[in-house]
Image (cartoon, helix red, strand yellow):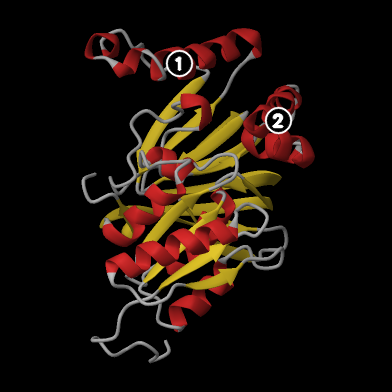
Amino acid sequence: MSTENSDSSAPKFAAVIYNPVKVDIDAIREAAGREASDAGWAETRYYETSVDDPGTEVTREALDDGAGMIIAAGGDGTVRAVAEAMSGSGVPIALLPSGTGNLLARNLNLTLDDLNHSLHSAFSGKNRPIDLAKIDIERDGGKIDHHAYLVMAGLGLDAKMLANTDEELKAKVGWLAYVGAIGKALTDKNYLRMRYQLGSDKPKAVRAHTIIMGNCGSLMANVVLLPDAAVDDGELDIIVLRPEGIIGWIQIFVKVIWENGVLRRTKLGEKLVSKDVKALNYFRGEKLTVRLSRAEPIELDGDEFGEATALKTWVEPGGLLVRVPADA
């Protein structure tokens, strides 16, 4: 790393990594300038993402420049790319939620639509350690790509749903654009055939519609997919969907929407939650290995990541520091 700003007496500076398509950079500059000055920080610096670099390389550049905090201004893809570059840096990340999902911010109960509050929390808040999920994706031909994710990675329904989503419609109506894509994905009859191994357990073969690995549990519209997931528990939560016809999908709907989203919100309701059903199974562990019978689409934090023939994913406990409000 560069020695710039290595003098401990010099004021720290924050680096804003921003997606120019998602944010109003002029508004951010004005609010960040005010908050940095009030908190005694040096002038904030700005690094723009691009199609070729969604945030990873410019974040490394900002860290090399000596940034004392990275502010990710963009959607889930920007946050994921920034966090991937920050692994092990010890530098905190602050979130300026933008875009459709803002899933990490939702799972941390951070403000979604208040720029001034988000920047005040960045400069005057505190650090919260959270887990960072890592994944090795094996491609056809044996090439392995290494990445990180913060919320969820998935094979099957959610990856195919992303592939079917109209990006122009998504920009206009947000998450509602996924509704039609879900319908297309549900009619896909190509099931995943795979062998998976949780930690050091014995490998198991399974035919499934979808497998999702989660570092967090909540999605948009208050859908709680992984009710026991916590962003700082040092484990991955895994869900395998194996519906057989309409009855299987009804079982999944009842578990995810009704039981996870409604019953689990009260102590009395928790007592009414049923055991796992055949169409849906939960697992937990520190590491998961999956090998597929053929290449399948994979997604990380809501972005398509090509096709995988195998993967290994694990958690780096406390691998990322996130700025949260001082009174959180």
Instruction: Classify 159 as above or below 225.
Output: below
Residue 163 pos. (x, y %):
74, 40
Indicate which disc residue 76 carries.
Answer: none
Q: Nearer the viewer, residue 124 or 73?
A: 124
What separation in Å lies between label 1 and label 2 (alpha carbons)?
24 Å
Q: Nearer the viewer, residue 282 or 303?
A: 303
Instruction: Classify 327 as above or below 226.
Output: below
Indicate which disc residue 255 carries.
Answer: 1
Residue 229 pos. (x, y %):
35, 36
Residue 16 pos. (x, y %):
49, 66
Residue at 35%, 74% (x, y): give it: 68
Residue at 27%, 56% (x, y): give it: 125
What SS does tag 2 mark? helix
What SS does tag 1 mark? helix
Residue 152 in view in this figure:
yes
Q: Nearer the viewer, residue 82 or 156?
A: 82
Image quadrant where one finds the N terminus: bottom left
Image quadrant where one finds the C terminus: top left
Write down the residue under mark 2. Answer: 177
Q: Which mark sits nearer the N-terminus, 1 or 2?
A: 2
Q: Nearer the viewer, residue 191 or 100?
A: 100
* Amino acid at circle 1: Lys
Residue 222 pos. (x, y %):
46, 25
* Amino acid at circle 2: Ala
Quarter of the figure with residue 161: top right
Crowding at mark 1 (Cα within 10 Å: few <14, some 14-19, many 20+): many
Quarter of the figure with residue 108: top left
Quarter of the figure with residue 233: top left
Q: Nearer the viewer, mark 1 or mark 2?
A: 2
